[in-house]
Structures are given as structure tokens and as C-alpha cells.
Amino acid sequence: GRPNPIPTARGNEMTEDPTLPMASFKAFLIVVGILAIITAAIFIIPKIYTPPNPNRLIYNNFEFKKASDGFWQTQWQSEGKVYDITLRFNPKEVETVPIKGQLNNTFNRQPYYITFDPQQDNNSDYKYIALAVGELGLNLVRGMGKTIESACTKNASDACLEHPIVTCDDDEKAVYYLRIAPEPRVRLEGNCLILEGSELDLIKATDRVLYHFYNIIPG
């Protein structure tokens, strides 16, 4: 049946207050609306905002994932074939390494000679030269299908006895010259591409030019 009216005093009479049921209903609707907004926020906000994953990067439409060994991996396609690319640094970490100069047509020749100076001042940098040579050579051969040959700029150590002596002055050869320098940078000088840096910065310069050749970092 009909609920008992809420009495109010008017003079000596007891009457119903018609505003109370409507006020209660409006309050109920407000509470329901607030709960609906809170519930929607709980489900929608996580979909709108996803915290960045430090082990994943989208760069120029390439997806990079950081492997357990700290290297960054992506896939690159050429002539219908898909290649797995692995580099120590991701493109965001090396995009500011400058590339200056210009290469000439000799640089299209193969093999590519990867050379270094065995008498550089700091012997501790040799291991970084070795790492850079390995990363460069692996990507040139497996990723780009190029032919390479290890070389030295002078015959000054046992490591150079069985390798050709090649410098940037060999105009008829395409040369990669890895050189220890204070800052990472890439210099293009005709037939010679010079990679400069100290310790890990040398590998940054190497990865920068590889991303350039893969057209992952355009320009």
C-alpha cells in the first residue's frame, strides 16, 4: 500500500511535506551518478594511460624490444626478406650523434675495409674498438649482405700481421675507419667513413651510422 506520509506542523494541523520525497529521489540520482563515474574511471583510465615500458620503444614505425642481455632488437625488411637486427643502443639513444660530410661512388665498392690504428694512445680502448668492429661487421654482412675485410692502418702489432694495411688515403677502396676521439660522431670523407668516440661512445657512433643505413633514423 501507500507509505505513511511524513507529518509536518501547520498551525494545529498535521500535513504531508510534498518536497521531501522529490529531494530524496534527486539525492539518490546524484549518488548513483557519482558511483557510475567512479566505476567508469576505474575501467577506462588504465586503457587511456599506459605507463611507458622502459624495455620497449616505437621509433619511426619500428618496434624495439630490449633483450635480457641489454641489447635492442627489431626487425628490418629488404627485398621481401625480414632480418632480425640487434644493436647495443636503441635509435633514441644515438639519434643526436652528428653525421657530417659526404661519401663518393668509391664507397659503393666491396669489400668494405674496416680499419683502425693499432698504436692509438689508450690501450684500454681496444676492447671497445673490437666491440664496435664486431657490431659493424655483423650488421654489414648479415643485415645488408655486404662483404667486409678487417684491416689496420699500419703494421705495428701482432694482430695486424695477417691483415692488409688500409687507410683513408687508399682512394680506390671503401673504408670504415674506427678512431678514438673525445666525442661520438660520424665523418663522411669521400671513400672513407670515420667512426669516432671513446669507449661506449664509439659504439654509439657505430650504431648511429647503422641506423642511418637501415633508414631507421632517416636523413
Image (tube, helix red, strand yellow):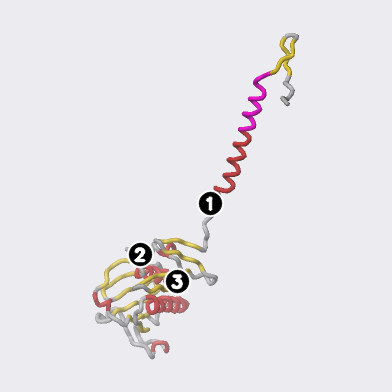
Q: Which residue corresponds to mark 1?
A: 47
Mark seen at residue 2:
none
Q: In which quadrant is the C terminus drawn? A: bottom left
Give the SS element for disc 3.
Answer: strand
Residue type, label 3: Leu
Q: State which quadrant residue 171 falls in.
A: bottom left
Horizontal side of residue 37 vs 56, given as left or right: right
Give the SS element for disc 2.
Answer: loop
Q: x, y (%) of residue 107?
A: 28, 76
Q: Is residue 107 above or below residue 2?
A: below
Q: Residue at x 34, y 63 (%)?
A: 218
* The one of 173 and 9 positioned closer to us in this rendering: 9
* The one of 12 and 145 positioned closer to us in this rendering: 12
* The one of 25 and 139 positioned closer to us in this rendering: 25
Q: CA distance from mark 1 to mark 3?
A: 31 Å
Give the magenta range.
17-29
**Dominant SS in magenta:** helix
Mark with earlier residue (2, 3): 3
Q: Nearer the viewer, mark 2 or mark 1?
A: 1
In this view, the residue farthest toward the front is 1
Residue type, label 2: Pro
Q: In which quadrant is the N terminus drawn? A: top right
The answer to if 26 sits in the magenta stretch is yes
Q: Which residue corresponds to mark 3?
A: 87
Q: Is residue 7 above or below residue 90?
A: above
